[in-house]
């Protein structure tokens, strides 16, 4: 078996108290990369917290038939002979089970590691091998300094540690960089995973890595230079370490990872990937940008004169793929971004059962009639976990949002209660569970909350935050270069000769691109001159992901966009059966798709909405979306010939749709008057007032 679906990397901590509330260094960080995507990194204040999250993840992945490699940055084994003396067996995993029995490690990180170290040291002759502790803990069983040890018979370093400068020996328990304490507490926790997941989990290199879950030892300093290079400006180093490690392992092919997992010392353990740093590093610097489009992506089936709109759309949908790179962004700054991966809840919402109202909580429902109950001491309020259980038959004051104390599953509304003399009275019936919210009734931990391809809304950011998600894998915004072509064009504001017209398309298309959620890149105007156009397309291809031109797209003498793309061998004239609209010139320039729109502003806008809109959504990673239309009664008459689909400038007035007074394709005022388009079918049609027609608001084209 080769290959893992999910890579998890954990930066462990032996801290004796919960780490600060604010994500900080020297605490526990976990990075998860699924299917080679971007990393999800989480901060954990306690070992219990990270283990709970990890166990949920492992259970979900296991149930989905997916393989997980989980790395931890502490030694998995000790110098040869240690396990034998402690457990009577050479098996390093017998040592894990032994640690799990000795170690107590509370939910708040309080633990007995000094006592465990003393117990272990007593099993050896002389003094040691463990050393290092805070003042007051030291003594003959645990020396404060390494130099006070003697006669314990253990070597100082494992074989693997002789290969790496700077790695700390596992005997050192105290002060910076000491991994000894982390291993004592960590191995006890990992033994818990082994017990829970049984034959589905193996430990590298002690067991063959053929199970769905594989645990391995890692050493992030191995890629220290890379972590320093790739650390984000606002990123905590520990976070960068687990993220970079996870990305490096996730980028490996199955065979390379299998080779690494095959290395190691059967008794002392091994650091996964040691000696393969260059292989690991490679995956970090290959751009995560998706492959470019193929040259024939705009090829049309042979022999077709006029392509129906639906066929043209279907071709675009099948030929185009996302072209934007994936990056890791703060959830709070992701509004408007397209998600590159499904986002899963890190925590349930609500996390605990709580009350939906202000009132009085007790256990069980009550039947018809009056009820009197003694009030228990204290009250439960949001943010305050009430520790003592509410005694049977008693009620407790409880405020909206408060977690239900033990002994409470039902809440009666305060308005329905009379309070006095340490008692409450109210009239039944009240159902068991009334006025309460179940844990996870909104969202369960590990549930997908937002799908890949979604453009993040403000409400989505609330959902992410409520379920503990702080960073997401998002696509970089699609950059769309906009070019106007034509000798006749001048810029509004400049003086125009009689034969000149102002460039209306460029500002319109730049605005449209921004409204679609992409990044418009203004490339200015180019004259009807091949070299100038070629130079402009060169510049556009260097700065943008796609180019949108207007004008010069037909087959006339001055139609340089189509001529140039034809010469480059990567252009197709799409004669689409659409009105308004002349041919679209579609092609690739240096691997970048070029959408050549007609110059006429009405045709340019309609073709941009109908074709470029869905196509750019796909290039941006947002999937293919057909604008939402509505069947509404017409307020107009119209007779149309068969052969072309028609789009009319339209708007709703009193629940009927009216159209602009003129169909003249040069009438920009009609575009501005309109709030959407009426779409008339490809075939012939006679419309009289009251007939149903399809109306598509402009907003539908933009979402
Ligand atoms: P073309 O497709 O280049 O033959 O242009 C068709 C018509 O649209 C001509 O009348 C052009 O003057 C006009 N046109 C082309 N580009 C623009 C533009 N950027 N703004 C306004 N009108 C334009
Ligand atoms: Mg022109």
Image (cartoon, rainbow, N blue to C red):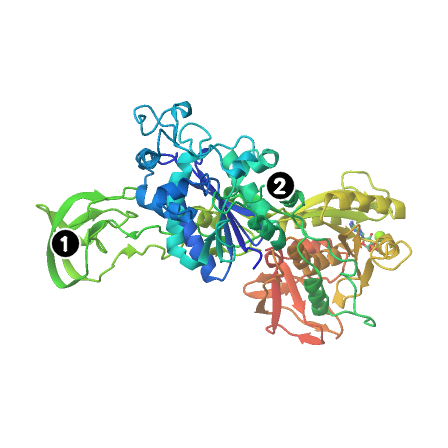
Q: What's the CA distance linking mark 1 and mark 2?
A: 62 Å
Residue at which label 1 appears = 392
Secondary structure at badge 2 equals helix
Residue 636 sits in which quadrant? Answer: bottom right
Instruction: Give the percent coordinates (x, y) of residue 654.
Output: 54, 63
Q: Contact (CB < 8 A) between labels 1 and 2?
A: no
For the C terminus, the quadrant is bottom right
Q: For the residue carrying disc 1, how many other residues have a C-alpha within 10 Å: few (<14), some (14-19), or many (20+)?
A: few
314 vs 25, left or right, is: right
In this view of the protein, which residue sits in the foreground, 517 or 403? 403
Residue drawn at the location 56% of the way across and 50% of the way down: 261
Q: Is mark 1 within 8 Å of ligand 1?
A: no
Q: Position of residue 434 (x, y in %)?
A: 25, 59
Looking at the picture, tell me which residue is in the foreground, 269 or 536.
269
Would residue 529 be visible to someone looking at this image? no
Residue 637, can we see it?
yes
Question: Could you say which is closer to the camera, residue 656 or residue 229?
Answer: 229
Q: Earlier in the sequence, mark 1 or mark 2?
A: 2
Q: What label sits on residue 277 in the rendered view?
A: 2
Q: Locate the N terminus and report the quarter of the image it occupies.
A: bottom right
How many labels were placed on the picture? 2
* Location of residue 155 in the rendering, given as x and y in whole percent from the top left corner: 46, 34
Side (left or right) of 596 relative to 633 = right
């Amino acid at each position: 078996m080769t290959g893992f679906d999910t890579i998890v990397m954990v930066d462990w901590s032996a801290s004796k108290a919960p780490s600060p509330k604010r994500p900080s260094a020297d605490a526990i960080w976990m990075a998860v990369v699924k299917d080679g995507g971007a990393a999800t990194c989480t901060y954990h204040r306690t070992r219990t917290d990270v283990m709970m999250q990890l166990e949920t993840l492992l259970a979900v992945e296991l149930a989905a038939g997916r393989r997980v490699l989980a790395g931890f940055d502490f030694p998995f084994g000790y110098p040869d002979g240690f396990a034998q003396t402690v457990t009577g067996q050479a098996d390093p995993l017998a040592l894990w089970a032994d640690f799990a029995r000795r170690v107590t490690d509370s939910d708040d990180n309080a633990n007995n590691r000094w006592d465990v170290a003393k117990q272990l040291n007593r099993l050896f002759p002389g003094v040691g091998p463990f050393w290092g502790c805070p003042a007051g803990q030291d003594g003959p069983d645990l020396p404060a300094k390494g130099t006070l040890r003697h006669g314990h018979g253990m070597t100082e370093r494992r074989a693997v540690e002789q290969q790496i400068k700077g790695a700390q020996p596992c005997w050192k328990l105290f002060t910076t960089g000491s991994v000894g304490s982390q291993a004592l507490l960590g191995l006890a926790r990992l033994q818990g995973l082994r017990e829970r997941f049984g034959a589905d989990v193996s430990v590298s290199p002690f067991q063959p890595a053929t199970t769905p879950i594989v645990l391995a030892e890692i050493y992030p300093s191995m890629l220290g230079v890379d972590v320093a290079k790739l650390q984000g400006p606002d990123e905590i180093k520990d976070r960068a370490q687990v993220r970079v490690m996870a990305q490096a392992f996730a980028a490996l092919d199955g065979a390379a990872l299998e080779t690494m997992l095959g290395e190691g010392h059967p008794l002392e353990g091994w650091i996964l990937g040691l000696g393969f740093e260059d292989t690991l590093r490679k995956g970090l610097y290959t751009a995560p940008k998706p492959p470019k489009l193929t040259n024939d992506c705009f090829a049309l089936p042979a022999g077709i004169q006029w392509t129906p709109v639906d066929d043209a759309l279907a071709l675009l949908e099948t030929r185009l793929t996302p072209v934007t790179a994936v990056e890791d962004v703060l959830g709070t700054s992701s509004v408007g971004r397209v998600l590159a991966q499904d986002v899963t809840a890190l925590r349930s919402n609500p996390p605990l059962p709580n009350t939906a109202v202000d009132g009085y909580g007790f256990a069980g429902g009550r039947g018809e009639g009056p009820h009197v109950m003694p009030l228990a001491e204290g009250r439960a309020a949001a943010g305050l976990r009430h520790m003592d259980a509410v005694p049977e038959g008693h009620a407790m004051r409880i405020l909206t949002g408060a977690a239900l104390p033990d002994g409470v599953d039902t809440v009666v509304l305060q308005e329905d209660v009379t309070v006095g003399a340490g008692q409450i009275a109210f009239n039944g019936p009240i159902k068991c569970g009334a006025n309460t919210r179940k844990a996870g009734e909104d969202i369960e931990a590990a549930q997908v909350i937002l799908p890949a391809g979604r453009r993040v809304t403000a409400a989505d950011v609330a959902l992410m935050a409520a379920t503990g998600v702080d960073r997401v894998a998002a696509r970089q915004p699609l950059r769309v270069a906009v070019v106007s072509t034509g000798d006749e064009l001048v810029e509004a504001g400049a003086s125009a000769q009689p034969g000149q017209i102002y460039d209306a398309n460029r500002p319109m298309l730049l605005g449209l691109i921004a409204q679609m959620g992409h990044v418009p890149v203004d490339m200015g105007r180019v004259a009807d001159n091949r070299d100038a156009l070629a130079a402009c397309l060169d510049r556009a291809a260097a700065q943008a992901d796609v180019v949108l031109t207007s004008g010069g797209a037909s087959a006339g003498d001055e139609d340089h966009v189509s001529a140039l793309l034809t010469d480059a061998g990567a252009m197709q004239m799409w004669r689409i059966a659409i009105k308004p609209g002349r041919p679209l010139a579609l092609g690739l320039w240096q691997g970048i798709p070029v959408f050549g729109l007609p110059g006429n502003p009405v045709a340019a806008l309609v073709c941009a909405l109908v074709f470029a809109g869905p196509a750019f959504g796909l290039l941006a990673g947002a999937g293919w979306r057909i604008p939402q239309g509505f069947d509404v009664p017409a307020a107009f008459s119209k007779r149309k010939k068969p052969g072309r689909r028609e789009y009319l400038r339209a708007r709703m007035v009193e629940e009927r749709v009216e159209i602009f007074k003129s169909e003249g394709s040069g009438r920009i005022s009609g575009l501005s008057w309109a709030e959407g388009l009426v779409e008339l079918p490809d075939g012939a049609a006679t419309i009289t007032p009251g007939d149903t027609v399809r109306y598509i608001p402009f907003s539908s084209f933009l979402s």
